[in-house]
Amino acid sequence: MLRALFVFWGLLAGTIPAQGLSLNLIHRAGDRDLARSVLLLGADGLSGTVTGKDIVVHARQKVRLDGTVNRYERTIRTCEGNRLVSKLTVTALADGSGYGLRESSAFGSRTRRIGGGRVRGVVDASWPEALIPLLLDVDAGRIDVLDLVEARVRSVSILPRDGPARYLDLPGGGPTLHLADGNTFRMLSVPGEEMTRILRAEVAAAETLPALPGSLSETEVRLPAPSQRAASVTCPRESEGRLPGIVLVTDSDARDRDGNGPGIRSGLLRELAWELADAGCVIVRFDPRNPRAPDTDWEAQKTDVRAAAILLRDREDVDPGRIAVVGHGQGGLLAVEAARALEGLACRVAALAPPARPLRDSMALRLRTRLQALGRTGKAIEEAEAALHVELNQLRDLPEGAKMPPGARLLRQAMGIVPTESYLGYPHPLMLVFAEDDATVPALHRGMLQSALAFRGLRQVRFRVISSADRQFRTTGASGPAEGGATSDVIRPRHPALVEFIRLFILERP
C-alpha cells in the first residue's frame, strides 16, 4: 500500500530530481572506449542515446508515480545510412497484469503478452543504462524486473557489495552499480565476454575540483563516536587566539559533505566552508547519512551534528563559547533541532532555505509542481495529491514495531515536526535566510512563516530574503531561475549576500 509513497519520498530525497539530471557516460571494455552516451533522468523516467562506432541506440523508459515501468522504447540504427536494425516497444497492460512486447528487426519480428504484473526495471543488453535509476533507488532486497531476452518477468535480488556497490543477481551474472562518495553514480559494470564498464565522463576524465586557497588548511577526520562520519575541518593557516567554530549541515538531497548530490553540483557547503574559514572561523562539514538506510532516522542525524560540535569544542584553536550551526534546506531545520540538545555547545543557528511549512505540505506542493511540469490535468493532480495524503495517513497510523520500507522511519519522524514551532521555540539567536527564486520554499510559504513569527513576536529570530537567488543561492538575474540544471550551478556565481549575512551573524558578539 505504501510503495508509491516511498518511491516519491525517494524523489524528494534527491535520488532522481524532478527537474532532471544529465549524465555524460563512456562505455569502456578493457582500455578501449566502445561508445559514448547521454542519459537524462527525470521524475517520469529516463531517456538516452548511445553512439558507438557502427550503431546508435535511442531509448526511453517512462515510469508511473509508484516507480513501476509504464512504457519502454528502444531503437537501434546504423551510423552509416541510418538503417533500422531493431525497434522494440513494451507497453504496460491496462489491467496491471503485465506488458505487451512488440519487436521488429531485419531478422524478423515478435509479439508477446508478458504476465507477472508491474516491474521496477528493464534488463536490456542493448541499453543497460535502463537499470541505473533502479539500482540508485534500491539499496537491497527483492525486486521484479522485465528480462527482454527471455520476454519474462523475473523476481531478482539486489545485493549490497563493498565499495560501495549494488549487484543485481541475474542468471549468468548481473550488472553491478558502483557508487562514488556521497552515494552518487560512478560506474555500471556489465558482465560479458569482456567486462564492459559504463562510467561517468567526469569520473573518467578525473574531474578536478577548485583548489583550496593557500591561506587555508583542510584535514580529513572522523567525527567522534557514536557518529564516526567522514568529515573535513577547514581553518586559517595563520590565526591568533581562539576562533569561532561552525558546523555545516547538508540538505536532505545532498549526498556528500560539499552539498552535492544527483543533479546538484554547486558545492554550496564547500564554498561556505572556505569563505567562512577565510573570515576567521574553524569549519567542520561531514558526509550525511543515506536517508533510505535502515539506521537513518532523525535522532541519528542529530547525533551527527552533536558529534561535529563536540569535535570543534575539543580543539585548542576553537572558542567553546562560540560554536554555531549552519544548515541548508532540511538541514536547516535539523540544525535547529540538534542545537537545542547541544547542552550549551551551540548558541547561534543560521538556517539557509529551511522548510517553512510541515513536510506534508511541502511534499504536496512538490508533487503538484512536478505533475504540472509534466502536463497533467487539474483532476489528475488533485487525485494524485489525495492519494499522497492517504498514504501519509497510513504511514502515520502504522503501529509501533511494524515493518517499514527504506526511509520510512525518517519520513514518519520528519512529518511530525512543525517548522514554525521549532523556530519559535529555539532559545538562542536564530537567522532564517531564504532565496527569492527557491521553488521548494515559495514566496507564499515564506510569507506565512514570516507572518507567524511577527504575530507571536520575533524575539531572537531574524528573517532574511536574498533577491535574485535560487535554492543553491546562485544568482538568477531579473528573469528568474536560470535553466541548465547542474551545469548552470557551476557557471552562475554564488550570491555575495549569503556569506556576508552568515559572517556578520556568526561573528557578532553577544
Image: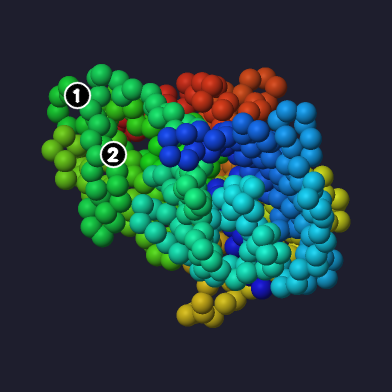
User: Label 1 amino acid?
Assistant: Arg
The C terminus, quarter of image: top left
The quarter of the image holding the N terminus is bottom right
Query: Is residue 133 shown above or below 348?
Result: below
Residue found 25% across the figure and 19% down from its top: 214
Figure coloring? rainbow
Label 2: which secondary element: strand
Q: Please provide percent x and percent y for residue 491.
A: 54, 21
Residue 203, numbered label: none
Mark 2 or 1, nearer chain start: 2
Q: Residue furthest front?
A: 107
The residue carrying pointer 1 sits among few (fewer than 14), some (14 to 19) or many (20 or more) residues within 10 Å by Cα, namely few
- Residue holding disc 1: 237
Q: Could you tell me residue 343's position as x and y percent?
A: 27, 55
Residue 383 is at least partly visible in this image: no
Q: Give the amino acid type for the residue marked by disc 2 in the picture.
A: Ser
Local secondary structure at mark 1 = loop
Give coordinates of residue 143: x percent, y percent: 58, 67
User: Mark 2 packing: few (<14 Cα in 10 Å), some, or many (20+)?
Assistant: some
Number of numbered discs on residues? 2
- Taking 167 as reference, is 440 above or below it? above
Would you identify the image quadrant in which residue 151 lies?
Answer: bottom right
Q: Which mark is residue 232?
A: 2
